[in-house]
Image (spheres, rainbow, N blue to C red):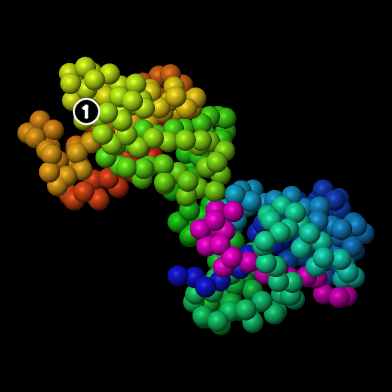
Amino acid sequence: MYKKIYFDMDGVLADFDKGVLQLCGIENRDQATKTEEEDNLMWAKVRDVEHFYDKLDFMPGAREMFLRIYAKYGDRVEILTGIPKEKRGIVTAGEDKIKWIHRLLGEEIKVHIVYAEEKKNYCFGPEYVLVDDFDRNINEWKEQGGTGILFKNSEQVNEFFELNGPEYRLVEKLIDKKSHIAFAESCTGGLAAARLVDVPDASCVFDESHITYANKAKIKCLGVLPDFIEKYGVVSEEVACKMAEGVSKNSGAEVGVGISGIAGPTGGTENKPIGMVCFGFCIDGKPYTFTKKFGNIGRGEVRKKAVDFVYEKLNELM
């Protein structure tokens, strides 16, 4: 478990190069190929822009990336960002960076303003992580025994922290489509909904869900007819589809999901064995149904695999 996760600001969260181009009218060349004269000119241009750092845009995907990690790790996530040397004459750099971070990411975010060579002093072992776009900072961090991530893009960081799963992709798709989702769960008992709310922006696409474990709950809350359950059986694609349609109608969500299955260790038959789960999806009024037979692999594992299938299939259908 990580004790601290530090993010650099410019070049990781804020797009410094884009700011130099848009606000200063020049291109910021790579440090390794830039002459001293070119470097001095760039900093002079930056100095001429009042509150330069507070005017920067996010790097692509950076806000979502940071908020995902902050949602998972809380106040162990902090900003560790450098400021230009005094000779650059950008006296408001530290103040402007703090304003940018608190305005766009939240007042609760702790910020450390240091010179670049001082960053390594915040490292006390492998449980301390630095995400930075400057290879020298990362190398010095690793020399102190820390975990360093040389930033390339937000997807790379999401992958490192295992925050690029199908639930994140689904929320992004739902936001893009301005759609909402609702679940009607039986054997999974709320696990599908719980996985969705692990995503920080889930509130944009999710209002309510139903755990309808007993048949009478499916009848009362979702409008599944008793004769329908008797005809097809509660574990059937037909009933799962009616569950999806019912929860979509009741909640007003464009996407409804119904899950009904036999997780075990008892309850299976020859035709409907333990590990069989039926799924119904109602997407913009169009029904889809599927059945998976996961086998007698244990109650918890059946439920987990059922939720995995829901998110994989939703991403495919959408």
Residue at numbered disc 1: 234
Residue 28 rendering spot, x and y as whole percentages: 78, 58
Q: In percent of the image, x 13 and y 33: which residue is there?
A: 272
Q: Left or right of 297: which side holds 97? A: right
User: Seen in the image, is 315 located left or right of residue 268?
Assistant: right
Q: Is residue 72 magenta?
A: yes
Q: Is residue 213 above or below residue 297?
A: above
Instruction: Determine the residue positioned at 48% across, 42% down.
Output: 169
Q: Quadrant of residue 153?
A: bottom right
Q: Residues within 10 Å of mark 1 (few under 14, many from 20)?
A: many
The extreme right residue here reads 48
Task: Kindly state the secondary structure of the residue where label 1 is placed.
Answer: loop
Amino acid at dot 1? Val
Whether residue 242 appears in this view of the structure is no
- On-image quarter of the C terminus: top left
Give the x, y percent position of residue 75: 59, 65
Question: Quadrant of residue 120 in the image?
Answer: bottom right
Q: Which residues are magenta?
A: 67-87
36 in relation to 236, above or below: below
Q: Is residue 203 visible?
A: yes
Of residues 83 and 107, which is closer to you in this image?
A: 107
The residue nearer to you, when weighing 277 against 188, is 188
